[in-house]
Image (cartoon, helix red, strand yellow):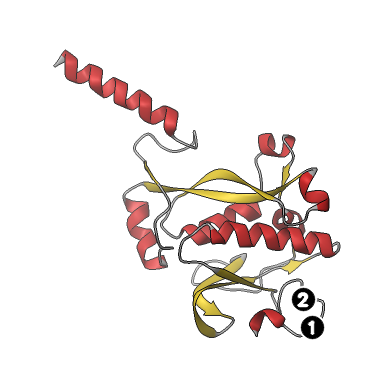
């Protein structure tokens, strides 16, 4: 019996040091990113079993991203459900922690989404919608369409480019997302100054 108790304590200590987030409950199980982005129907099961998934969120960083708009850098997060794509974008909008901000990380998505949500769901008014294997409204395998539900108050092409890089990198970490289409709240292509909605062609 003493040997069993000792082994249990050692295993518990190892588990605590490898968890990517101190806020995860002691009973939670941390899993690596699933090979496919789970559907909403899978999330309730994950919540009930207290399983979390290790994901990354890609932020801009000063000074690198000031001139190189596509330069984004990953930080570790946990998704409370198997809907890891949705969770990753939600955490991109929440932005970096105070400690991460002090290190130079920043999120254009946090800084420039303004106004009320124009989207509705059964219980909330979400910040965005995410549809898999869809380009706009057309089926396209491997393409994710991310539609913003708030006005993106851009301060210029650099802001647009950094925000686009953050969203693209955050979603493309998942194996079944090869391409990302980003739409404004009015369903036009994000950052498309031509007005021709080239991302939908």
Q: Is residue 68 visible?
A: yes
Relative placement, left or right, of 118 versus 80 is right
Badge 2 marks a residue whose secondary structure is: loop
Residue 68 percent coordinates (x, y): 79, 53
Of residues 96 and 64, the one nearer the viewer is 64
The relative height of residue 105 versus residue 138 in the rendered view (above or below) is above
Of residues 149 and 32, the one nearer the viewer is 32
Q: Is residue 89 visible?
A: no
- Mark 2 highlights which residue? 192
Residue drawn 65% across and 70% down?
149
Of residues 182 and 118, the one nearer the viewer is 182
Residue 188 percent coordinates (x, y): 71, 80
* Image quadrant occupied by the C terminus: bottom right
Residue drawn 67% across and 79% down?
199
Residue 45 percent coordinates (x, y): 32, 57
How dense is the environment of label 1, judged by Cα within 10 Å: few (below 14), some, or many (20 and up)? few
Per the rendering, the mark at residue 195 is 1
Relative placement, left or right, of 135 versus 190 is left
């Amino acid at each position: 019996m003493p040997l069993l108790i000792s082994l249990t304590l050692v295993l518990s200590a190892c588990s605590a040091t490898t968890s990517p987030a101190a806020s995860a409950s002691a009973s939670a199980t941390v899993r690596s990113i699933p090979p496919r982005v789970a559907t909403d129907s899978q999330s309730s099961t994950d919540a009930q079993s207290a399983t979390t998934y290790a994901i990354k969120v890609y932020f801009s960083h000063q000074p690198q991203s000031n001139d190189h708009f596509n330069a984004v850098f990953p930080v570790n997060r946990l998704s409370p459900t198997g809907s890891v794509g949705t969770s990753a974008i939600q955490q991109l909008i929440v932005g970096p922690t105070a400690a991460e901000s002090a290190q130079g990380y920043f999120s254009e998505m946090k800084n420039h989404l303004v106004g009320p949500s124009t989207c509705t769901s059964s219980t909330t008014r979400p910040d965005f919608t995410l549809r898999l294997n869809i380009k706009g409204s057309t089926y396209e395998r491997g393409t994710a369409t991310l539609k913003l539900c708030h006005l993106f108050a851009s301060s210029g092409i650099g802001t647009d480019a950094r925000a686009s890089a953050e969203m693209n990198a955050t979603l493309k970490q998942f194996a079944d997302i090869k391409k990302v289409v980003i739409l404004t709240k009015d369903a036009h292509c994000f950052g498309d100054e031509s007005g021709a909605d080239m991302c939908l062609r």
